[in-house]
């Protein structure tokens, strides 16, 4: 669980992050979860955008992604979320 101070730092880092992924009409399947897990392992902090067509299901899908990737939800704004998962093996990891 992240503290408010850690979330604030991660939100600031997410503003400049270029690691973006989009969830579209195909929703969430094992391939999408694998993609997000690999992205979290490589970058620790990623942005995920939801297509407007699945926006009504965004809360449910966010919970599913967080549970399946074992990541921390940093923030949820509009049609996007920011996820963080620490990778202790990464050389230039994010220090909280």
Image (tube, rainbow, N blue to C red):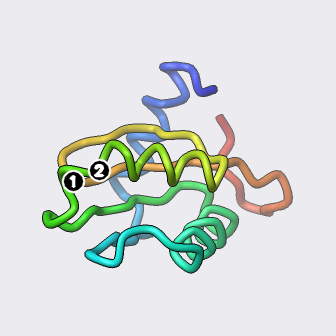
- In the rendered image, which quarter is residue 92 located in? bottom right
Above/below status of 76 relative to 91: above
Q: Residue at x 51, y 21 (%)?
A: 5
- In the rendered image, which quarter is residue 75 located in? top left
Q: Nearer the viewer, residue 38 or 27?
A: 27
Label number found at residue 79: 1
Task: Residue 79: give x, y in percent of width and height.
Answer: 21, 53
Q: Is residue 80 left or right of residue 46?
A: left
Label number found at residue 27: none
Q: Mark 2, residues whose alpha carbon is within 10 Å: few (<14), some, or many (≥20)?
A: many
**Residues at marks 2 and 1 touching, judged by CB atoms closer than 8 Å:** yes
Label number found at residue 58: 2
Q: Residue at x 30, y 62 (%)?
A: 49
Q: How much space separates mark 2 and mark 1, taking CA atoms?
A: 8 Å
Q: Residue at x 36, y 70 (%)?
A: 27
The kind of secondary structure element at disc 2 is: helix
Q: Quadrant of the C terminus?
A: top right
The kind of secondary structure element at disc 1 is: loop
Of badges 2 and 1, nearer the viewer stands 2
Tally of numbered discs: 2
Q: Quadrant of the N terminus?
A: top right
Above/below status of 9 relative to 44: above
Nearer-N-terminus badge (2/1): 2
Q: Residue furthest left?
A: 52
Q: Residue furthest top?
A: 4
Task: Residue 57: give x, y in percent of width and height.
Answer: 27, 51
Above/below status of 26 relative to 7: below
Q: Mark 1, residues whose alpha carbon is within 10 Å: few (<14), some, or many (≥20)?
A: some
Q: Residue at x 24, y 42 (%)?
A: 77
């Amino acid at each position: 669980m992240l503290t408010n101070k850690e979330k604030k730092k991660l939100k600031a880092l997410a503003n400049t992050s270029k690691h973006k992924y989009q969830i579209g009409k195909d929703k969430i399947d094992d391939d999408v979860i694998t993609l997000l897990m690999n992205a979290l392992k490589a970058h620790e902090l990623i942005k995920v955008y939801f297509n407007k067509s699945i926006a009504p299901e965004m809360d449910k899908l966010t919970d599913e992604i967080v549970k399946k990737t074992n990541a921390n939800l940093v923030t949820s704004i509009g049609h996007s979320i920011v996820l963080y998962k620490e990778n202790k093996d990464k050389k230039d990891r994010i220090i909280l």
